[in-house]
Image (tube, rainbow, N blue to C red):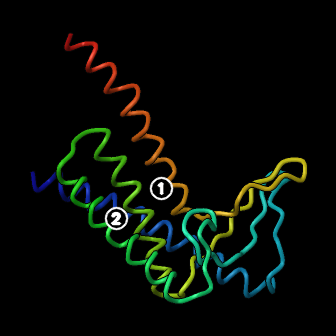
Amino acid sequence: MLKNNMLNFFLLVFIFVIDRLSKIYILGLDEIINGNTISVNKFLNLELVWNRGVAFGILSFQESFWYNIITILIFVIIIILIYLIFSSSGFKKYSYIAVCGGALGNVFDRILYNSVPDFIDLNYNDFHWFIFNVADIFITIGVFCLIFDEIIIEKYKNEKNK
């Protein structure tokens, strides 16, 4: 059990560190390029934007009260996720770890910078998706895995038990 919890902790910290390193790199790079956009290829740009909202800039507020309320709610969600990590197993546990690791990365930035640095700009034919960061990738993958688990795996388990 201790070995399993150590692996879970390592994965959570690994996700957090990968996110932190990517943000530290992009913040340093932004100082060098003076806020200009870097075109990596025709589908990907690196462009630093500061997000005071939740995912993809949704619920962005300039007022400190609402920003702090959202930050507290995210922190409560992280506590719930940690409980779910300990009370689940297998695929679902790792999905929760991905979501929690990403959420920890973003809440750390909310506390440190009072905003979250987003910098990955995917685009196609002048259509730009929301700018996001590495933590958002882990959160999104984890949520999609949880949805997959609920729809496909649970359905399969239910059919198998009939």
Q: Quadrant of residue 61?
A: bottom right
- Give the crowd class for mark 1: few <14, some 14-19, many >=20 residues within 10 Å: many
Q: Is residue 123 left or right of residue 50?
A: right
Q: Residue furthest top?
A: 162
| Foreground tag (1 vs 2) | 2
Q: Quadrant location of the C terminus?
A: top left
Report the residue at 59% width, 69% height from top: 59
Vertical relation: 146 (above or below) 39: above
Q: Residue furthest left?
A: 1
At label 2, the amino acid type is Ile
At label 1, the amino acid type is Ile
Vertical relation: 16 (above or below) 36: above
Report the residue at 75% width, 71% height from top: 47
User: Which residue position is annotated with label 2?
Assistant: 77
The answer to whether the residues at label 1 and label 2 have Cβ atoms under 8 Å apart is no
As measured in the structure, the alpha-carbon distance from the residue carrying label 1 to the one carrying label 2 is 12 Å
User: Which residue position is annotated with label 1?
Assistant: 139
Q: Position of residue 73 (x, y in %)?
A: 38, 71
Q: Residue furthest right?
A: 125
Report the residue at 83% width, 55% height from top: 41
Vertical relation: 123 (above or below) 14: above
- Give the crowd class for mark 2: few <14, some 14-19, many >=20 residues within 10 Å: some
Vertical relation: 14 (above or below) 95: below
